[in-house]
Image (spheres, helix red, strand yellow):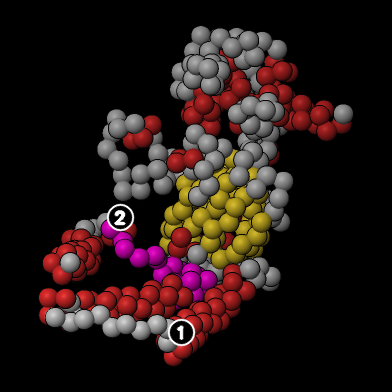
Amino acid sequence: MLRKATQLFAYAFAFGWLVPLASVVQAEEPKRWATNMPVGVTSVSQQIYSIHMQVFWIAVVIGVLVFGTMFVSMFLHRKSRGVKAANFHESTTVELIWTIIPALILVWIAIPATGTLRHLYDTEEAEIDIKVTGYQWRWQYDYLGEGVAFMSDLATSEDQIYGGSDKGVNYILEVTEPLVIPVDTKVRFLLTANDVIHSFWVPEFGIKKDAIPGFINETWAKVTEPGIYRGACAELCGRGHAFMPIVVEVLPQDEYQAWLAEKQEEAETIRQLTQQQFTLEELQERGEQIHNRTCIACHGATGQGVPGVFPALDGSPVVTGDLQENLDIVINGVPGTAMQAFGAQLSEVDIAAVITYQRNAWGNDTGDIVQPLDVLNFKLGQEGE
């Protein structure tokens, strides 16, 4: 038994040095070899880290005392030394010690933990409100009161995903549109979902909150350092769960205001484009981009879909048939299926472009042109019913 105990101790000692050593050797990509949770860049994340380290060192001390006592007892009082086992039963003093000390430790931990929880749930007096909606498999960010809303999709190419090209450092953690917030500003996130349960998780902020259909959850962050911070959906939400990243860009106040003004101008431009007429070529060019960003996961780049799972668009009776039915399905989705409602996800211009592209791509060649005004009129007609 002594030999086995010595071997286990040696292995544990060696492993305890090897893991930090691996972190040093792989310093160019430290996060892949990290052995601890991040300190983070918000007061909440730093408080969580502090409590975590307190509990860790308490556990270390307890472990050293318990296993040290066991090791010393086995070594000094082993049978080969002629030691005979003591025969005793119960000890009121020992019982009191190992009851009172753990109780005091729990109280010691509970006091800062309770304060941190109260701080974590305090979403009042936020300076910015952002509604975050989870979709399969993307995020929508709506800056309430600012007239700015956009979708954030995975930007990693299919070639990288399926091994056709080299993977970057931030493989499957790049997005088309990052969430942008200002530094040193309390931002409240109002979380919901459109289809299934998702989870908004940004480790550096110390936040992880479920986004539930038909329900609004709240969380917040006040980031102290500008930079780019990455997270992901932390709730298994279907086939594309692994491809639903979160990227948050934290900017200085002046840069954030410039970005917000640019996005508001962009939103106004989109509203003006709704009144314009586009050529077939212009719509197809824009529609192909929208298809490859939004529809490709289910229907494929060539419109063949996934047999038995997702229907093909090439030769589809919906895509080549009645235009009003096609508009209805894209805008309102198909209940009970994976086909989402894109009326709130895409602008009238983007919906017109992607429908025009799909009705004229591959072997469809219908010659149909859908203008943004057609989409707007269809939505208005539904509202009037």
Q: Is residue 161 magenta?
A: no
| Closer mark to the observer between disc 2 and disc 1 | 1
Give the answer, above or below, for where 322 lies relative to 64: above
Horizontal arrangement in the rendering, residue 268 relative to residue 105 (left or right): right
Dot 2 alpha-carbon crowd within 10 angstroms: few under 14, some 14 to 19, many 20 or more: few
Given the image, on which type of amino acid does mark 1 rest?
Answer: Glu
Label 2, label 1: how far apart the Cα atoms are = 44 Å
Residue 6 sits in quarter: bottom left
Q: What residue is shown at x 61% (from left), y 62% (from top)? A: 219
Q: Reply above or below: 269 against 353.
A: below
Q: What's the residue at 39%, 79% (across, down)?
A: 58
Residue under circle 1? 95
Quadrant holding the C terminus: top right
Assess whether residue 35 is covered by the magenta stretch: yes
Categorize mark 1 by other alpha carbons within 10 Å: few (<14), some (14-19), many (20+).
Answer: few
Tell me where residue 146 appears, x and y as whole percent: 68, 55
Question: Which tag, 2 or 1, sits closer to the chain's start?
Answer: 2
Q: Look at the image and tell me whether residue 177 can be seen.
A: no
Amino acid type indicated by mark 2: Arg
Q: Nearer the viewer, residue 73 or 181?
A: 73
Residue closer to the observer: 266 or 299? 299
Left or right placement of residue 197 versus residue 383 in this view: left
Task: Read off the magenta span.
Answer: 33-50
Which residue was labeled with disc 2?
32
The residue at 57%/46% (across/down) is 198
The image shows residue 81, relative to residue 157, as above or below, that is: below
User: Quarter of the image holding residue 1?
Assistant: bottom left
User: Can residue 292 be seen from the camera position used here?
Assistant: yes
How many marks on residues? 2
